[in-house]
Amino acid sequence: MRLLILISILLVSGFNAAAQTQPPHSNPAGAGHSLDPVAKKPRSPLETKLSKVCGQWAEYWRQKQLDKVVALYAPDAVFLTGTGERFSGRETIRAVFKTAMQSHTSDLTPRSLVTEVSGNLAYDSGDYLETIIPASGVAKTELQGNYVIVFKRQPSGKWLIVEHVWTDKPAQ
């Protein structure tokens, strides 16, 4: 049971102060961002592309496409949960996500708020809303929270997630 709760927590976060100035999820990640909503500056094409990764991640998660979710991570990536758990390495992340996908269905809607690129490193930070329905179909949970994804440009030129953290709190 603790594992199911932990896995559910892996995928949730809350609204930050910047998000409180905007209607909740009026513009989800991947919905044609061209302006950074927090910094109020135009996003570069690369920043726009990276700001959409969390939306892609959420879509793959909803569709339970484990291989596509895991392919977004570097081999030595780290996934940090809101409860302080640390999962290191793509294969460990795969195992945790596989268990989570088997134990529940998630309707996750992220919203990118800030995306910055500097050299071979970049980050995207935002908030999300999520409805989690256990495999049993009983007692769905509404959650909200924040996320930060750190990307690193690989030698191939591809940007992959190297650090990923979610925070969570019950939706209000």
Image: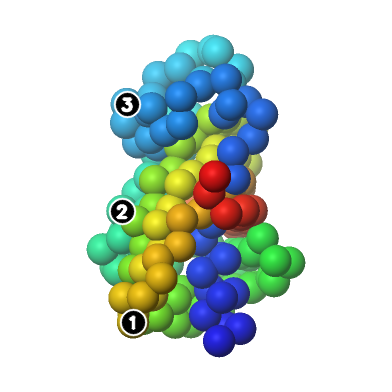
Place of residue 73 in the rendered image (x, y in percent of width and height, measured from the top left): 49, 61
Closer mark to the observer between disc 1 and disc 2 = 1
- Element class at badge 2: helix
For label 1, the crowd category at 10 Å Cα-Cα, with few meaning under 14, some 14 to 19 and many 20 or more, is: few
Tell me where residue 28 appears, x and y as whole percent. Answer: 38, 35
Q: Residue at x 46, y 31 (%)?
A: 24
Label drawn at residue 59? 2
- Residue 136 shows which numbered tag? 1
Tell me: residue 102, above or below residue 56. Answer: below
Q: CA distance from mark 3 to mark 2?
A: 15 Å
Residue 168 in the figure: left or right of residue 85: left
User: Toward which corner of the image does residue 20 lie, by quadrant?
Assistant: top right
Amino acid type, mark 2: Glu
Q: Between 11 and 151, which is closer to the camera in this rendering?
A: 11
Quadrant of res 164: bottom right
CB under 8 Å between callouts 1 and 3?
no
Label annotation for residue 32 = 3
Q: Residue furthest left?
A: 63
* Residue 71 visible in the current orientation: no
Mark 1 and mark 3: span between their CA atoms? 36 Å
Residue at the image position 31 percent from the left and 53 percent from the top: 59
The label shown at residue 16 is none
Q: Position of residue 1 (x, y in %)?
A: 55, 87
Q: Residue at x 40, y 19 (%)?
A: 34
Mark 1 vs mark 3: in front? 1
Q: Earlier in the sequence, mark 1 or mark 2?
A: 2
Amino acid carrying label 1: it is: Ser
